Amino acid sequence: QVQLVESGGNLVQPGGSLRLSCAASGSIFTIYTMRWYRRTPGKQRDMVATISPGGRTNYADSVKGRFTISRDNTKNTVYLQMDSLKPEDTAVYYCSADIRIIGGSTADYWGQGTQVTVSS
């Protein structure tokens, strides 16, 4: 009933930039908090950034000052602008969102992930 689709992952050199997008579609009534997470091999999934419906943001310490989360509520889309990328930012990036579906309840939905590789 609801799908989240990420895009924008790529191979980039250290110091470079990427912009990830995540578009939600389906029987959406309201989208609440939207988030970006990342997972590196052998590690658990870590929160990167969150944004409330009104635009309040929160970041992991490791990305503060380098990453910017934003959303376009008219497009049901959340973005992650990543600047000054480091090799340790290499991971699969996932978006998630708390979504209330039409005629139904609220649940946490996840995308399939997009690979970001930072390497020279």
Image (spheres, rainbow, N blue to C red):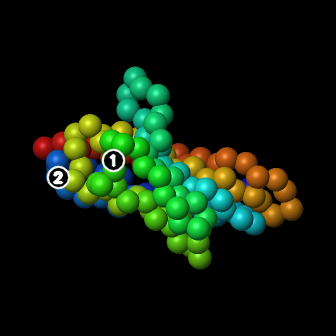
Disc 1 designates what residue?
Answer: 63
Indicate left or right for 7 with 27 as reference.
Answer: left
- For the N terminus, give its image quadrant: bottom right
Q: Is residue 22 visible to us here? A: no
Q: Position of residue 97 (x, y in %)?
A: 61, 53
Name the residue type under label 2.
Gly
Q: Nearer the viewer, mark 2 or mark 1?
A: 1
Task: Give the position of the C terminus as an image quadrant.
Answer: top left
Crowd around label 1: few <14 · some 14–19 · many ≥20 (10 Å): some
Residue 65 in sight: yes
Rendering coords of residue 80 (x, y %)? 40, 58
Q: Secondary structure at mark 2?
A: loop
In the picture, residue 65 is in which quadrant? Answer: bottom left
Q: Position of residue 70 (x, y in %)?
A: 46, 65
Question: Relative to 68, is 4 on the left or the right?
Answer: right
Q: Look at mark 2 in the image and give the residue it sits on.
A: 15
Residue type beneath disc 1: Val
Q: Residues within 10 Å of mark 2 (few under 14, many from 20)?
A: some
**Which residue appears at 22% of the width and 40% of the height?**
87
Q: Is residue 98 above or below residue 79?
A: above
SS for callout 1: loop
Q: CA distance from mark 2 to mark 1?
A: 13 Å
| For residue 86, side relative to residue 68 (left or right) | left
Looking at marks 2 and 1 on the same chain, the residue that comes earlier in the sequence is marked by 2
> What's the residue at 53%, 58% (across, down)?
51
Relative height, residue 109 to residue 44 (above, below): below
